[in-house]
Amino acid sequence: YQRRVRGVEGGVFLVAASTWFLFPESPRFLLENKGDVVAAQEALTRFARLYGGTYHPEKSELVASNMGATTSSLKDGARDFLTYPALRLQLCLQLWQWIVIAFLYYGFNFGWSKLGSNLFLSYLFAGLAEIVAANLAWFSQDVFGRKRTIIATFFLAGISFLVAIAPVEFGAQRVLTMQQLMSLVGSTMVSLCWGTMYLYVNEQSPTNHRGKITSLCSVFARFGSFAGPQASLMFDWNKTFTFIFFACLSLSCGMFMFGLPETRGKKSHNSARDVQDEADEGVGCW
């Protein structure tokens, strides 16, 4: 049985990996690292074709000059985080949010056995909630914006964790409790938020630091994912305290989100200086 499961898993990953051959190389990499403008033009043309758009090659010289101006060494990149307080604050807020969101996500994924009487039904509903969250993220981030979606999910998750403390049961056979219902709502909001955060951080980060910032966020999320399964053990100790703790973490991230800018419909920043200029104008970070 285990061999069959591993075989299916391996097949799925191989199919997923093969799809990367459909995508062209990064135009930025071709311009900055290879200096190949022609290859960059071809990559942009392929990207436009994949997404049903049209690329005009006559604009490639402008793209090359703009992107080339953002090239920075590792030393220059570190200096930007020390020089521009808005970029530094933005990074710190993002890192905290990613730690918390990973902590909550894995805390629930490893804790459903402690929140319901039927292990299989608990994980079944948790899986369905993931599907709902993925579709809501796709809809909400485009209709309401990335920032509003993230703020709403953090606050709704926090409120649901607090409501979960109420000792309420539903049905004559007590098949459902307020704790289970609100945990499901909260975990759905956490999943929805994490799906939006991937897009938001990429759009928010300046071009010459996008790779560094997204990588750092992913690294710090690992700390949350390591701690999350251990946090699920807190449900055995004191569920009321655990839900209050989860709520405080979620609400703190929602509050910090007010200090970050909206990215929907806006051009991504090209440099750290652009981030600082926007903050000086009263947009974005405090």
Image (cartoon, helix red, strand yellow):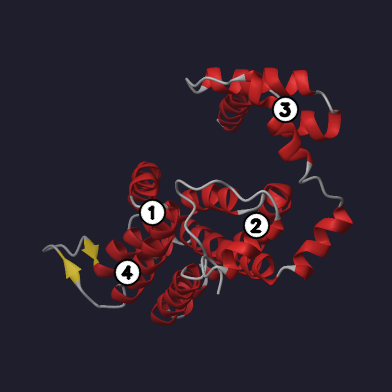
**Whether label 4 touches label 1, CB < 8 Å:** no
Residue hosting label 4:
160
- Which amino acid does the dot numbered 2 rest on? Asp
Give the Cα separation between the discs numbered 2 and 4.
Answer: 38 Å
Q: Which secondary structure, mark 4?
A: helix
Q: State whether residue 204 is above or below residue 51.
A: below
Q: Are marks 2 and 3 in contact (CB under 8 Å)?
A: no
Q: Earlier in the sequence, mark 3 or mark 4?
A: 3
Say which residue appears at 48% left-offset and 56% top-offset. 109
Under tag 3, what secondary structure?
Answer: helix
Which residue in the structure is indicated by mark 3?
Answer: 61
Q: In what quadrant of the picture does the N terminus appear?
A: top right
Which of the two discs, 4 and 1, labels the residue nearer the N terminus?
Answer: 1
- Which residue type carries mark 3? Glu
Q: CA distance from mark 3 to mark 4?
A: 52 Å
What x and y, as percent, mark residue 66?
Answer: 72, 39
User: Would you identify the image quadrant in which residue 43 lies?
Assistant: top right
Q: CA distance from mark 3 to mark 1?
A: 59 Å
Viewer-proximal residue, 268 or 127?
A: 268
Q: Which mark is residue 274?
A: 2
Mark 2 and mark 4 lie on one chain; the one further toward the N terminus is 4
Q: In the image, what residue occupies the spot 84% across and 28% down?
A: 35
Which disc number belongs to residue 119?
Answer: 1
Q: Residues within 10 Å of mark 2 (few under 14, many from 20)?
A: some
Q: Are marks 2 and 1 in contact (CB under 8 Å)?
A: no
The answer to whether residue 168 is above or below residue 149 is: below
Question: What is the crowding at mark 4: few (fewer than 14 residues within 10 Å), some, or many (at least 20)?
Answer: many
Distance CA(mark 4)–CA(mark 1): 21 Å
Circle 4: residue type:
Ser
Q: Is any atom of residue 18 visible in this view?
A: no
Closer to the chain start, of discs 3 and 1, is 3
x, y percent for residue 14 = 64, 23
